[in-house]
Amino acid sequence: MSKAKKVSPASLIWFEIPADEPARAKAFYGKLFGWKINPFPGMPDYEHIDTGGADASPDGGLMKRMHPTHSITTYINVPSVSRFMAKVEKLGGSICRPKTAVPGMGYFAICQDTENNSFALWEINTKAK
């Protein structure tokens, strides 16, 4: 019997690794940690990183680096991307990419903290369009 993991708010839910050469990074992480890295359905040039099954968490993505300072991005689960975007700005952070839908999965926003570190907010919502 498999139990679905309940994700609590503000928990790490996903990560993305940018790479100059995704095939090289795929080989590196696959051999280093034994991660299974395969194409993500419906998203060209994006790979799904399976970190090891039901007990391992979180899974992630591997993608082509978008700009020279593009670093690993962690996704934090929150109940409302809009509400947390406002909190980010109130606390002195900034919004790099506003609320964006991932159809059928949820919404995300890319933010920057007061120390210039990037992170993403993620809101699960199967009705996202």
Image: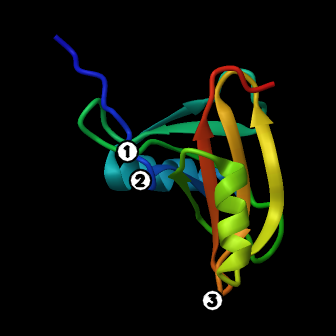
Can you tell which quarter of the image residue 8 is in? top left
Q: Is residue 73 above or below residue 78?
A: below
Residue 30 in the image: state x and y as whole percent: 42, 46
Dot label at residue 11: 2
Residue at 38 percent across and 50 percent down: it is 31
Q: Which residue has dot 3 on it?
A: 115
The residue depicted at 70 percent of the width and 84 percent of the height is 92
Q: Position of residue 62 (x, y in %)?
A: 61, 48
Q: Specify the quadrant that holds the N terminus.
A: top left
Amino acid type at mark 2: Ser
For the C terminus, the image quarter is: top right
Q: Which mark is residue 8?
A: 1
The correct choice, above or below, for 115 with respect to 41 in the image is below
Q: Is residue 127 left or right of residue 33?
A: right
For the residue marked with disc 3, what is the amino acid?
A: Glu
**For residue 35, which quarter of the picture?**
top left
* Drawn side of residue 102 relative to residue 105, left or right: right
- Mark 2 vs 1: CB contact within 8 A: yes
